[in-house]
């Protein structure tokens, strides 16, 4: 039998599915220096997926970063609320008077020490359901699943499944031993041609199968 010529997908194409313009790869799309996205992570939206930076990354006034790993799937309406959404809560009013201009702008220093949880970081191979929301400074682990409509206010463990408002851990996809094995394999960092040759294992195989398929024997 002839050997199949395995050609990896192209991570630099904006629309990886030509007949579905609603799907965009985020790495070639984003321009903000405050957003980092790994290869093949995509966003799906029937309206305007190319407006991801302005419609889905909210209140991003810096300096906190949004970091999204490789091979993440973001359903329609997935939103990241950044630290710029915070208001002071140590006085009688939470209203941000200085941003309204006029003489109120003289008090802009009052907005300089808002509480911050740091960067928002999403691991590799994370799936976000429709309408999921991630709050500032959250860490979402590798291989996690965020259910539709979930509001994630706390960190999500590797290979955890969370849902609800506020989101709670429903279960983990694998036991602790297999999670450790998967993290050690880090398949998202495999050479693209090798990964391409083992797509079936990645999508339907076991952790044992994945170890056998790893480059140089794992």
Image (cartoon, grey):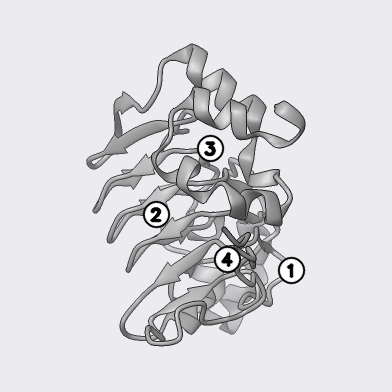
Q: Nearer the viewer, residue 50 or 60?
A: 50
Secondary structure beneath dot 3 equals loop
Mark 2 or mark 1: name the one nearer the start of the chain: 1
Q: Quadrant of residue 71?
A: bottom right
Select label 2 or label 3 by which is in front.
Answer: 3
Q: Secondary structure at mark 1?
A: loop
Of the two numbered discs 2 and 3 on the same chain, state the one appearing first in sequence. 2
**For the residues marked 2 and 3, what is the alpha-carbon distance in whole angstroms?**
39 Å
Dot 3 or dot 1: first in sequence order is 1
Q: CA distance from mark 4 to mark 1?
A: 11 Å
Q: Is residue 167 left or right of residue 86?
A: left
Residue 36 vs 216, above or below: the answer is below
Which of discs 3 and 4 lies nearer the camera? The answer is 3
Residue pointed to by mark 1 = 33
Residue at point 61%, 58% (across, down):
111
Q: Quadrant of the C terminus?
A: top right
**Disc 4 packing (10 Å; few <14; some 14–19; many ≥20):** many
Which residue is more in the foreground, 210 or 3? 3
Is residue 104 at all visible to an observer of this figure? Answer: yes
Q: Which residue is mark 4?
A: 60
Q: Secondary structure at mark 4?
A: loop
> Mark 3 against mark 1, which lies toward the viewer?
3
Read off the residue under disc 2.
Answer: 93
Q: Is residue 89 visible?
A: no
């Amino acid at each position: 039998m002839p050997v199949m010529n395995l050609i990896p997908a192209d991570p630099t194409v904006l629309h990886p599915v030509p007949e579905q313009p609603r799907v965009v790869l985020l790495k070639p799309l984003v321009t903000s220096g405050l957003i980092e996205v790994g290869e093949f992570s995509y966003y799906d939206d029937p309206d305007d997926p190319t407006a991801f930076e302005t419609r889905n990354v909210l209140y991003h006034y810096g300096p906190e970063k949004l970091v999204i790993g490789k091979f993440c799937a973001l359903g329609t309406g997935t939103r990241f609320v950044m630290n710029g959404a915070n208001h002071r809560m140590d006085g009688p009013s939470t209203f941000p008077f200085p941003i309204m201009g006029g003489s109120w702008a003289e008090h802009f220093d009052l907005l300089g020490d808002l509480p911050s949880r740091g960067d928002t970081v999403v691991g590799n191979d994370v799936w976000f359901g429709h309408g999921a929301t991630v709050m500032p400074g959250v860490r979402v682990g590798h291989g996690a699943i965020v259910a539709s409509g979930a509001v994630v206010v706390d960190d999500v463990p590797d290979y955890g499944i969370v849902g609800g408002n506020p989101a709670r851990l429903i279960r983990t996809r694998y036991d602790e031993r297999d999670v450790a094995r998967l993290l050690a394999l880090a398949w998202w960092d495999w050479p693209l041609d090798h990964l391409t040759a083992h797509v079936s294992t990645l999508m339907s195989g076991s952790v044992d199968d994945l170890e056998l398929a790893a480059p140089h024997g794992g």
